[in-house]
């Protein structure tokens, strides 16, 4: 019985033809879909006595392949016909065009701009090829101060005074020298360091700097802005903590951690494993910050007896890494579309 049905369908399948995509789709549904004829036969196949299963099974497989091949063949010839006609068929569904995606660094940058602009920060900008003054001296790095070695610098040959900026803090100086306080700016941008390229370091990356200067500004203001921003970006449960640190341009200086957003600050996963992100500590470092050193204000023409301020600086790759768990920094600059396509729905 079943063998005959298979034979009959095999013949039918050979004769199939379709004039257009709709007819082809109808055939596909009739034969190959879940409710199609072939699936019906599959159901019947279950009741075939064991000794016949092998021969009938082989026939059934042959039918399946033939039907699939026939449908593909019809589809190909329809597509060729399509290509051959000069007059486009305006009623045809357009073939989907691949859309590009936004780069993860841009997604993060725009998120941060959005968050800080809601808190009243405006954007500032400065050159990537900078002079020593704006990158170092005006930021309170003394001429022979070892802190200059904190950042491996690219110098421009024959111009010892010109460098590729190692941090966006140089834009702080650019803003201060031409603006009367109050100042409230963020400066996103690319920075360069003379580092061997690896999964954890690159010779260029991106930072976002923040600077706030007014008459009465306290560390508590800095903490509050940092807390709001962290909660916007990493979720309402996020906690922050400040650890004492050193930067030439801030005093006091701090490094800021957020409670780990992967394990919720517990240090371990639900099934008891050590959290891979915070390594069990419950905290991850995200930025450097502090109260602007009065020397920096004076060096940039701002009266330090009247004004004070805070500043912060963060790496965009680091933030992207925390949000999207990108393990190899190089992925951000290789522009491999397979990597970029993973961000289709992000942001
Ligand atoms: N410029 C620092 C760096 O590149 C980051 C930084 C730390 C910026 C503290 C700041 C700050 O404005 O207050 O490592």
Image: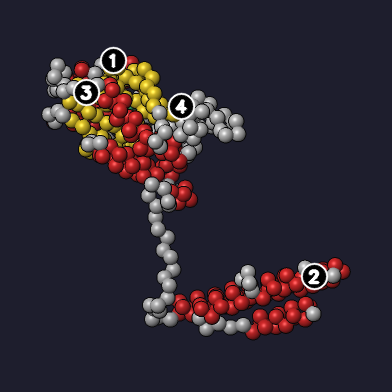
Q: Marks 2/1: CA distance?
A: 89 Å
- Residue tagged by mark 3? 217
Circle on res. 144: 1
Mark 2 or mark 4, whichever is nearer to me: 2
How packed mark 1 is, by other alpha carbons closer than 10 Å (few <14, some 14-19, many 20 or more), is: few
Residue nearest the observer in this picture, 194 or 320: 320
What's the residue at 57%, 34% (across, down)?
270
Front residue of 249/53: it is 53
Q: Earlier in the sequence, mark 2 or mark 3?
A: 2
Q: Are marks 3 and 4 in contact (CB under 8 Å)?
A: no
Quadrant in which the N terminus is drawn = bottom right
Provide residue 130's location: percent of width, then percent of height.
24, 31
Q: Residues within 10 Å of mark 3 (few under 14, many from 20)?
A: some
Q: Are marks 2 and 1 in contact (CB under 8 Å)?
A: no
Q: Is residue 302 left or right of residue 154?
A: left
Question: Quick check: marks 2 and 4 in contact, CB under 8 Å?
Answer: no
Between the residue at mark 2 and the residue at mark 4, the CA separation in whole angstroms equals 61 Å
Residue that label 2 marks: 47
Tell me the distance, in whole angstroms, between the alpha carbons under discs 1 and 3. Answer: 31 Å
The residue that disc 4 covers is 283
Image quadrant where residue 184 sits: top left
Instruction: Say which residue appears at 43% left-offset and 72% top-offset.
Output: 93
**What distance separates the C-alpha of mark 2 from that of mark 3?**
83 Å
SS for callout 3: loop
* Residue 205 locus on image (x, y percent): 37, 36
């Amino acid at each position: 019985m079943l063998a005959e049905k298979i034979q009959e369908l095999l013949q039918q399948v050979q004769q199939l033809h379709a004039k257009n995509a709709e007819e082809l789709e109808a055939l596909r549904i009739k034969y190959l879909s879940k409710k199609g004829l072939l699936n019906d036969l599959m159901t019947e196949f279950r009741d075939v006595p064991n000794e016949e299963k092998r021969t009938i099974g082989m026939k059934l497989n042959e039918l399946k392949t033939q039907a699939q091949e026939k449908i593909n063949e019809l589809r190909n010839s329809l597509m060729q016909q399509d290509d051959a006609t000069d007059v486009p068929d305006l009623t045809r569904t357009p073939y989907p065009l691949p859309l590009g995606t936004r780069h993860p660094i841009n997604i993060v940058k725009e998120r941060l701009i959005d968050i800080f602009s809601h808190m009243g920060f405006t954007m500032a900008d400065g050159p990537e090829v900078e002079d020593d003054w704006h990158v170092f001296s005006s930021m309170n790095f003394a001429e022979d101060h070892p802190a200059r070695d904190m950042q491996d610098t690219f110098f421009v040959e024959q111009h010892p005074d010109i460098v590729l900026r190692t941090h966006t803090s140089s834009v702080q100086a650019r803003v201060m020298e031409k603006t009367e306080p109050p100042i409230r700016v963020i400066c996103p941008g690319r920075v360069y360091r003379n580092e061997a390229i690896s999964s954890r370091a690159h010779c260029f990356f991106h930072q976002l700097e923040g600077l706030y200067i007014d008459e009465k500004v306290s560390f508590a203001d800095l903490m509050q802005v940092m807390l709001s921003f962290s909660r916007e970006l990493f979720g309402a449960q996020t906690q922050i903590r400040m650890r004492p640190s050193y930067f030439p341009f801030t005093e006091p200086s701090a490094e800021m951690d957020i409670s780990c957003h992967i394990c919720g600050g517990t240090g371990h996963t639900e099934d008891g494993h050590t959290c891979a992100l915070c390594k069990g500590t419950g905290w991850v470092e995200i930025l450097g910050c502090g109260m602007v050193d009065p020397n920096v204000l004076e060096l940039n023409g701002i009266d330090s007896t009247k004004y004070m301020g805070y500043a912060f600086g963060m790496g965009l790759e680091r933030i992207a890494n925390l949000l999207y768990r990108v393990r190899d920094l190089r992925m951000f600059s290789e522009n491999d579309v397979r990597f970029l396509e993973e961000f289709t729905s992000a942001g």
